[in-house]
């Protein structure tokens, strides 16, 4: 079959591997960029549909912005948390309204802060935490962790955590509670700055398809 879209106009899309990425693929497919082979379960990471002019890659969610910033992907979908934390050089084009959660400060139930001492904050999001407390002039010590943040205050490693809260189940099951909300988070469509110039027509067609969808 003759390709409908020239290879130079093929959109290279970095999708966050996992449940959110599958949802994102569903939206992109409805918006005119289907690639049915992606739904076949396999260990493959790259899928292409030349007729639709699209190539998808599954990447680790926190790496999507790196692929897009460096032009290995023209566009991608990343959480606002990653964009705030790493500030990649990309265009943020659209809030997709999915993957909604919030960045929050949480602490053991009943925790009382001692304002005389620096607050020990465990987090994967050091910059977000630093910006947040810096804005209030609160002295803190960051303990940077890579996951399972909730156990830090339980084991006395930190006083509080700054982390993502979605359903609140992880906090509840570990006897923690939200103390302060920092910022709402959702999935964003991002684009490489020069890719956006060269493939603007395709990106705009995708955005129009996404905007027209039923909410
Ligand atoms: C995230 C976050 C919380 C949990 C919140 O963890 O760091 O632990 O989800 O979700 P909930 O409010 O619905 O319980 P993730 O699964 O990404 O693992 P990690 O942070 O431990 O790597």
Image (cartoon, helix red, strand yellow):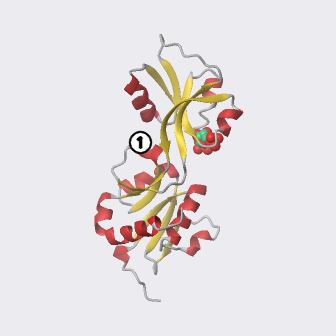
In this rendering, position of residue 83 left or right of residue 149: left
In this view, the residue in front, 112 or 90, is 112
Q: Residue 113: where, in percent of width, then height?
A: 54, 16
Q: Residue 133: where, in percent of width, then height?
A: 43, 26
Q: Is residue 57 visible from the viewing direction of this image?
A: yes
In this view, the residue in front, 77 or 208, is 208
Tell me if mark 1 has few (under 14), some (14-19) or many (20+) residues whose alpha carbon lies within 10 angstroms of its own.
Answer: some
The residue lying furthest to the bottom in this view is 1
The residue lying furthest to the right in this view is 173
Q: Residue at the spot x=63%, y=71% of the render?
A: 40
Q: Is residue 87 above or below residue 145?
A: below
Rendering quadrant holding ligand 1: top right
Q: Residue 17: where, in percent of width, then height?
A: 56, 57
In this view, the residue in front, 112 or 84, is 112
Q: Which residue is mark 1?
A: 84
Q: Residue at the spot x=62%, y=36% of the render?
A: 148
Which image quadrant is residue 7 in?
Answer: bottom left
The residue lying furthest to the top in this view is 116
Q: Residue at the spot x=64%, y=24% of the render?
A: 108
Which image quadrant is residue 169 in?
Answer: top right
In this view, the residue in front, 26 or 37, is 26
The kind of secondary structure element at disc 1 is helix
């Amino acid at each position: 079959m003759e390709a409908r879209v020239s290879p130079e106009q093929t959109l290279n899309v970095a999708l966050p591997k996992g449940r959110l990425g599958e949802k994102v693929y569903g939206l992109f497919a409805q918006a005119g960029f289907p690639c049915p082979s992606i739904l076949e379960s396999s260990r493959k990471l790259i899928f292409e549909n030349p007729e639709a002019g699209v190539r998808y890659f599954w990447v680790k969610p926190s790496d999507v912005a790196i692929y897009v910033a460096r032009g290995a992907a023209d566009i991608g979908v990343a959480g606002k948390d990653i964009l705030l934390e790493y500030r990649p050089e990309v265009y943020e084009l659209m809030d997709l309204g999915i993957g909604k959660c919030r960045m929050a400060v949480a602490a053991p139930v009943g925790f009382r802060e001692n304002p005389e001492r620096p607050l020990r904050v465990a987090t994967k999001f050091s910059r977000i935490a630093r910006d947040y407390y810096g804005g209030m002039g609160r002295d803190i010590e960051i303990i940077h962790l890579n996951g399972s943040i909730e156990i830090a205050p339980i084991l006395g490693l930190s006083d509080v955590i700054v982390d993502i809260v979605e359903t609140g189940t992880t906090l509840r099951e570990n006897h923690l509670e939200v103390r302060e909300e920092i910022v709402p988070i959702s999935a964003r469509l991002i684009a490489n700055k020069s890719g956006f110039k060269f493939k603007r027509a395709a990106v705009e067609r995708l955005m129009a398809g996404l905007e027209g969808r039923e909410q």
